[in-house]
Amino acid sequence: MKKLSRLTVLLTACLAAASFAFAQQQNQQESQADQDNKLVQTVRNATKQYVDNVKLAMTMGYGAVLGCVSGSDHGAMGVHYVNASLLAATTIDPTQPQALIYEPAANGQMTLVGVEYIILASLLPPNSAPEVDGHLMNYIDYPNRYGLPSAFFELHVWAWRNSPKGAFVDWNDHVTCAHQ
């Protein structure tokens, strides 16, 4: 009887620990989702006036570069409208993305699907690891296919077009360049 009682106590303790670990994991996942949603919401708030108004973006200093960028094996990015004056920044302001990304439609319209934050590595101290609201930026070496004068860091945020692989990946399988 004593052994059964000890076994019951041990099993109860194990179940309690497992429940605690599961709850902690759930909280960590929810915290990450909240953080992800925070940056997406920041982008939406900062760019809502540009969603169907590429002309307004152009009056604010954004200009098209490279044409529509599509992936070699899946997805696309779209047409990047870059604000060159923001490329000189040494810090990232989440409310001022360096690039607005538009998808061309069959009727000639351009629809904002996301943004890209860009910072030149040459403007940062050595061994920097820049981030935007807690999201580490990706390092792109020089020379690169984008023609930037140095290596750079970038982060895409798919705030206006859902991406099946997440809001912060480079290529979005739900974006196409078919109508360029």
Image (tube, helix red, strand yellow):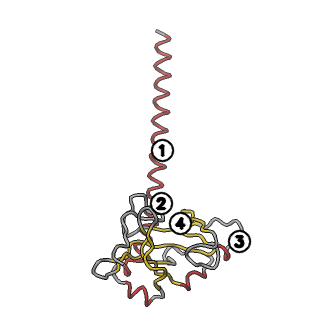
Image position, residue 166 (x, y; %):
43, 59
Q: Earlier in the sequence, mark 3 or mark 1?
A: 1
Residue at the far left in the pictured view:
107
Question: Toward the viewer: 156 or 171?
Answer: 171
Task: Name the residue beneath numbered marker 3.
Answer: 125
Disc 1 marks which residue?
25
In the structure shown, which secondary structural element does the residue marked by tag 4 occupy?
loop
**First reached walking from the N terminus: tag 3 or tag 4:** 3
Asked whether the viewer can see residue 7, the reply is: yes
How many numbered badges does the structure rendering display? Answer: 4
Identify the element where label 2 is drawn.
helix
Comes first in the chain, label 2 or label 3: 2
Check the image and report above or below for 2 versus 43. Answer: above
Mark 3–mark 1 CB contact (< 8 Å): no
Q: Secondary structure at mark 3?
A: loop
Q: What is the C-alpha distance between the residues marked 1 and 2?
A: 15 Å
The numbered mark, 4 or 1, whose residue comes first in the sequence reads: 1
Residue type marked 3: Pro
Foreground: disc 3 or disc 4: 3
Name of the residue lying farthest toward the top? 1
Q: Are there few (<14), some (14-19), or many (20+) residues within 10 Å of tag 4? A: some
Q: In the current view of this chain or complex, which residue is farthest to the bottom? A: 59
Where does label 2 land, which residue? 35
Residue at left offset 47%, top offset 23%: 11
Cα distance in 3D space between marks 3 and 4: 19 Å
Give the x, y percent position of residue 135. 54, 63
Which residue matches tag 4?
Answer: 133
